[in-house]
Image (tube, helix red, strand yellow):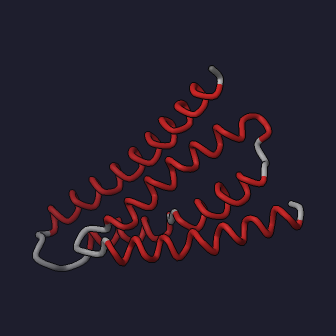
Amino acid sequence: MTPLALLLVALGSAVGAPVRFLVERRLAGAYPWGTFVVNVAGSALLGVVVAAAGTSGSTPVVALVGIGFCGALTTFGGYAAQVLDLAVAPGSVPGGQRLVRSLVYAALSVAGCVAVAAISYVTVVSLTSG
């Protein structure tokens, strides 16, 4: 990795992490919508960036937006902790319903992120191969 690429990753990360923080705080509630939104949005954006980069793969935009911004915006660790929290956190939801709620969130997050990444990738490729 070149010094410029490293700087671009750092700059993208410096923007992505605060955006994730703000979205998660704005959408805070009983259900972790903030993490879901940033993970789906980041996956869609990453699909666009990867498609736009084409076969070159490593470009300044990939470093800045793909690795830096999207890497800091999306959060697998936060997602995993929230899946577990939904399953085991005591509250007004009975145990069996907590487990179902947790599994639905996990499945929707994975399926949603993969779907929007694929859709955005295919859309960009089809628009640019014209």
44 vs 5, left or right, is left
Height in image: 76 above or below 43? below
Image coordinates for residue 44, horizontal then vertical, percent? 50, 47
Image coordinates for residue 94, horizontal then vertical, percent? 11, 69
**Quarter of the image with the C terminus in it:** top right
Height in image: 49 above or below 95? above
74 vs 104, left or right, is right
Residue in front for this viewpoint, 29 or 18: 18
Total label count? 0
Residue in front for this viewpoint, 126 or 90: 126
Q: Write the residue at 19% across / 79% down.
A: 90
Residue in front for this viewpoint, 101 or 95: 101
Q: Write the residue at 25% across / 74% down.
A: 29
Instruction: Please identify the residue farthest to the top as the structure is shown.
Output: 130
23 vs 121, left or right, is left
**Quarter of the image with the N terminus in it:** bottom right
110 vs 103, left or right, is right
Q: Write the residue at 50% across / 69% down.
A: 77
Image coordinates for residue 125, horizontal then vertical, percent? 61, 29
Image coordinates for residue 75, horizontal then vertical, percent? 50, 66
Q: Write the residue at 38% across / 73% down.
A: 24
